Amino acid sequence: MSTATVITVDIARPNSRAIARAVTALSDGLLVVAPTETRYGLLARADSPDALDRMMAAKQRPVSMPVAVFAPSVHRIPQLAILNRQGKALAEKFLPGPLTLVLENRSKLAPPCVQHKKIGIRVSPSKVISGILEQVTFPVTATSANLSGEGDAETIDDIVIALRDSVAIYLDGGPLTNTVSTVVDCTVDPVLILREGAISRFDIESVAGVAA
């Protein structure tokens, strides 16, 4: 039987104590599941090899598969990545929102956050995520809270069944059924849509200036 700690949060007005519990766990290198604007994310210190190993083991995901990183705001993206013309246009139009930008890395992070000199960046409008990011001094991963190859779970109960005690804190914001983020590689011209999600291919290509 799982002994995971599940804390109910109001996604519109998250309790400061719940946020503090998550921040403490992350600071200690432990894993946290928290609601984004789309589905639940699995959070870990992106600058801690031990935390990343723990996260990949929990997901049963090989380190060769990349995971994204949260940026607190669009203005903070350049601390982690090079925001080129296409990336800047997409960021200004769609972020914060359900978009993952794959950009040229400029951080000191290691795999799985950085693969082939590229890094995926998410800027989430989730008040839970922003509340956590406001209180940490390190980058945080932005990957789905599921087992590798499995679908995105909608409820904390389903995630607890999958990840169990590998996660220290589960922040339960209720069922999340929104479409996952669109993933766009901006390091190539024209941009390459790696996964079409909440933002359509048409909208991405229109903003990025892709010829018809």
Image (cartoon, rainbow, N blue to C red):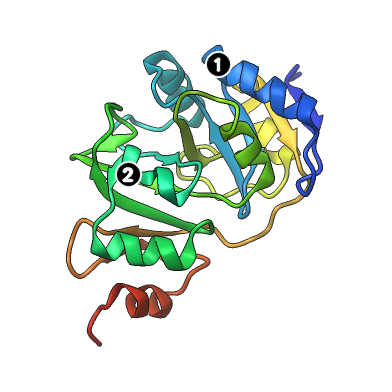
Residue 24 in the image: state x and y as whole percent. Answer: 63, 16
The three-letter code of the residue at mark 2 reads Pro
User: What residue is shown at x 40% (from left), y 33% (from top)?
Assistant: 61
- Is residue 20 visible in this depiction of the protein? yes
User: Which of the labelled discs sits on residue 68, or is there none?
Assistant: none
Q: Nearer the viewer, residue 186 or 137?
A: 137
- Count neighbours of disc 1 (C-alpha within 10 A) and say few if under 14, some if 14 to 19, many if 20 or more: some
Percent of width and height locating residue 168: 65, 19
Q: CA distance from mark 2 to mark 1?
A: 23 Å
Q: Nearer the viewer, residue 145 or 92?
A: 92
Extreme residue toward the bottom, this view = 212
Q: Please name the residue that numbered disc 1 is placed on.
A: 27
**Residue occupying the point 25% across, 78% down:** 210
**Residue 179 at x, y = what percent?**
58, 62
Q: Relative to 12, does residue 107 appear above or below in the rendering?
A: above
State the residue lying farthest toward the front: 75
Apparent side of residue 93 relative to residue 66 in the rendered image (left or right): right
Q: Quadrant of residue 32?
A: top right
Please name the residue shown 34% across and 31% down the image: 62
Q: Residue at horizontal 61%, vertical 40%?
A: 129
Position of 127 relative to 44 (above/below): below
Q: Quadrant of residue 46?
A: top left
Answer whether residue 30 is visible to the viewer in this image: no
Residue 98 in percent (x, y) is at 52, 59
Which labelled disc corresponds to residue 78? Answer: 2
Secondary structure state at the residue bearing disc 2: helix
Q: Amino acid at mark 1?
A: Ser
Position of 96 with respect to 121 (left or right) is: right
Secondary structure type for disc 1: helix
Residue 80 appears in which quarter of the rendering? top left
